[in-house]
Image (cartoon, grey):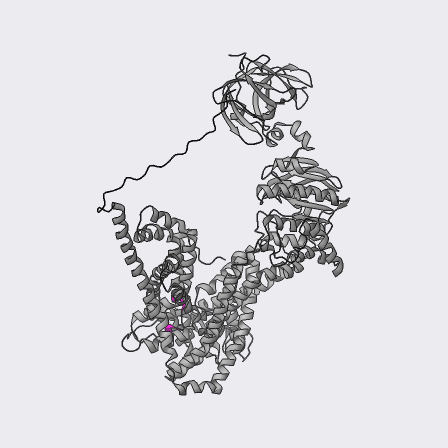
Amino acid sequence: MIELKSLCKSFDGVPAVRDLDLVVGRGEFLCLLGASGCGKSTTLRMIAGFIQPDSGSVLIDGVDVSGYGPDARPTSMVFQDYAIFPHLTVAENIEFGLKAQKLAKDERARRTEEALDLVGLTGLGGRRPNELSGGQQQRVAVARSLAIRPSVLLMDEPLSNLDAKTRIQLRTQLREIQRDTGTTIVYVTHDQEEALALGDRIAVMKDGSLEQLGSGHEIYLAPSNGYVADFVGITNWLAGEYAGGSDESWEVNVAGAVLRATPASTSSSVSPGSPVDVSVRPEDVSLSEEDAPGAGVLRGVVRDVQFLGPVVRTYVETGGSVVLVHSAQSGWSPGANVRLSIGEGAARAFRRVEGAWRPPEAAARPVVAVAAS
Amino acid sequence: MPVPSTTQQTVVPEERTERAPGSRPDWQRRSRRRLLADRITVGTLVAYVAGLLLLLVLVPTVAMLFEPDGEAWSRLAEPRVATAAKNTVVIGVASTLSATVVGFLFAYALSRPDIRGRAVLRVMALLPLISPPFVVGLAVLLLFGRRGLITHELLGLDISLLGLGGLWLVQTLAFFPMATLTLLPTLKNIGSTLEWASRDLGWTWFQTFRRVTLPLAFPTILNALLLVGMFVITDFGNPVLIGAGYQVLSVEAYVQAVGRQDFGMAAVLCVLLFVPTLILFLIQRRVLARRSAVTVSGKTGSLPPAPLPAAVRRGLLTVLGLVSVLMILIYGSILVGSFTRAWGADWSLTLNHWQTALLRGDDIRNSALFSATAAIITTISTLVAAYVVHRTRVFGRGMMDGLAVLPSAIPGTMIGISWLLTFNEPPIALTGTALILVLVMVVRAIPVGYRTAVTTINQISPSIDEAATDLGASRARVIVQIMFPLLGGAFTTSLVFGFLHAINTLSAVIFLTSPGIGLGAPTIVNLAEFGQWGAATGVAAGLMVVSFAGLAVAKLALGSRLRLYDL
């Protein structure tokens, strides 16, 4: 179990991590997700003991480890560039940490075998690192870290140097290993898909602070602010104004038409006319013929259709902006006139706050509604 | 619903229209002319490179091997020779080890951002690289000699550091930068990640150093040992100045050639010195070749290097601080010596020595002029050689490559003596001319220039000249319009390197200067041998001023584009 208590760290006066509080449970797989420079790697390195926080503390299994070096902490790191010792064989790499623990020779051999089996590299102990593929090297790194039985396994973008197929394969293997060993894992990534696939919980970070902490479902379906909605997955932004409604459902005026959207926060300070950004996932938009009965309120023209295999991506221009639509299949051709409808409860509304994160301008231009034209 | 059409039309290219037989298409005629022109271009370059290397490198070396007669060879058994050989081995091993250790400490400190004062350490490691190595010997003579400032004046001792001990100190200080220069890139490249990984797996700093850093640096340490070894056993200036009775092979060969005019014996001694140097050189090339196969993974990324434990940092700084103080004393004593009336007897200040140096200004001027000329010839020749070896498929490329780097394995003394033997009489009589001095400087500078040129030319992707050829450029045009501009940076770097190498060389030129045409470096040694220390330091300071000025001019003109020594 890890507890981070009001952790702060600056580099040359530039804050990297600001007052971070976070608790990771025993056996939990936690992903730290964020864009580069958000402080996620700095946080990981403070847990590992590579860098010392300016203030705040790190507790591992209830013990304050602040001030201890990495060799004294029950953590083990898996690096983005593997950090496999090139002058040692695979088995010697795995034994490296076991020797530091002064284990007997036969115990070391047993644990090395075990670790190799665990990552599916049985029998490759005698190989040299340069005889292995990137995916295999990273599995050696995982085996090396797991062999010393750390309380916490720390992973710093371990899959980002691998090709797409190996990445997905290793991802699945990592989940299995974690389930089998019950190791607590803190995993840093900038890839939201990876975070969704791996994490029991995801901590989304921005500018050194926690934006949202929750399961993948919560993060994706109920983002607590516009930044999280935009960073995790793909979304369409519609700019509008608050028109009324309850705490559970707002009516938002999007250029004349009224959309129903779930507010991310309560509407205590919102009043009719307040600017609101509405986020709609591409898979929640459906298209129908222009004069079909019960069609949506927004009218648009299909600009492009891209077949991506499992999904067809349709770009629909409505008024000044383009809305992305994902569907299993699409019979539309560029130029077709369509109407867009939004699934029940799928739109999320975020009150626009001065100085806070805002969706990119181009994506949030008002959409001209049918009623207005 | 409308379904987008997916059928695609295959576009069939139109057939070329046939020309009437007899009239060749234009492009074919042009292509044949181009082929001929290209052959002439390449042929000219090959002839130049091969001729230069054969004449300047191969001919004198081979000629010298045939100089000694049976009688001279039989004198190898003389006790004099045995003593010189034994001394060379002893001082060679001792200085090589100590210089590499000190060089490693410097490189290790320079690779650590948590070591403060790295700028000072950098200057300390740079000084011996850009000044003549024998200046260190001269300074030790002034400081620790029989009438030395420290031994005699301050401590009142009647002993001196001359001989084995002094030579060991001097060669350590003069040659450690070679090791630093070799080791620093590797130590920087080992990568903080691997060290962090080791710390993270539970090892302390010392264990990480022993189990990760040292093994990974080992091939480079070996390389540094071999390189320093070659410099140490062929060193001539320092043993001649402060060896006192401690004779080594290079000095013995000089004594035989210049003192006794016994060239057969001198040649035998040179060969005796050449054999181990060549072996070190060949092993070193092996090590280099093997090292390129082992890539050190775990590049740094954004992870800063692990900080050193405070005790280690303090220890390292203390040792390097002491070395730095010694270096400051050494270079300071040259400067002070040049203003002191009579070192060891009359400490009053004077400008006399600078006047003498100016009177001997001819030597310094010759040094500067000849070195600059040699640098230009070397740079152009080595760039052409690198192009011929690496960008054409002509016969004998391997041979040219070997000859271009071979001079770094030939002791300077041997080059000097072999040139004296080869170019003394027709067909090529050059002795006593300025040309022979310039050319011998070229030979001394060729290996370094060639390596710089090869590195740069290999950085230019072959697809660039392929693209130019494909667009219709001839070889000559590719060389002039593509290669030259791209090689611009290497050209100037090589020029400065060549200049410094040429102006600081002593052992080869000392045999070839003549009364009319002197050079700075041999003059300093001659003056010092006759105990004229004031004049010697004056000329030494003057020579250093010239090389530093050359360096400063290049630095001003090029700024950060001048990448001389990556320290």
Residue A229's image quarter? top right
Q: Position of residue B565 (x, y in %)?
A: 46, 59
Between B223 and B234, the one nearer to me in the picture: B223
Between B412 and A127, the one nearer to me in the picture: A127
The answer to whether residue B185 is seen in the rendering is yes
Q: Position of residue A76 (x, y in %)?
A: 69, 49
Looking at the image, residue B39 lies above or below residue A351: below
Residue A292's image quarter? top right
Whether residue A311 sits left or right of residue A143 in the image: it is left
Q: Position of residue A94 (x, y in %)?
A: 68, 55
The answer to whether residue B153 is seen in the rendering is no
Q: In the image, which residues are magenta? A: B501-510
Q: Residue at x 72, y 56 (%)?
A: A98
Quadrant where the image shows the N terminus of chain A: top right
Q: Residue furthest left?
A: B22
Between A259 and B515, the one nearer to me in the picture: A259
Q: Position of residue A133 (x, y in %)?
A: 59, 50
Instruction: Assess whether residue B83 is covered by the magenta stretch.
Output: no
Q: Residue at x 27, y 52 (%)?
A: B32
Looking at the image, residue B216 lies above or below residue A319: below
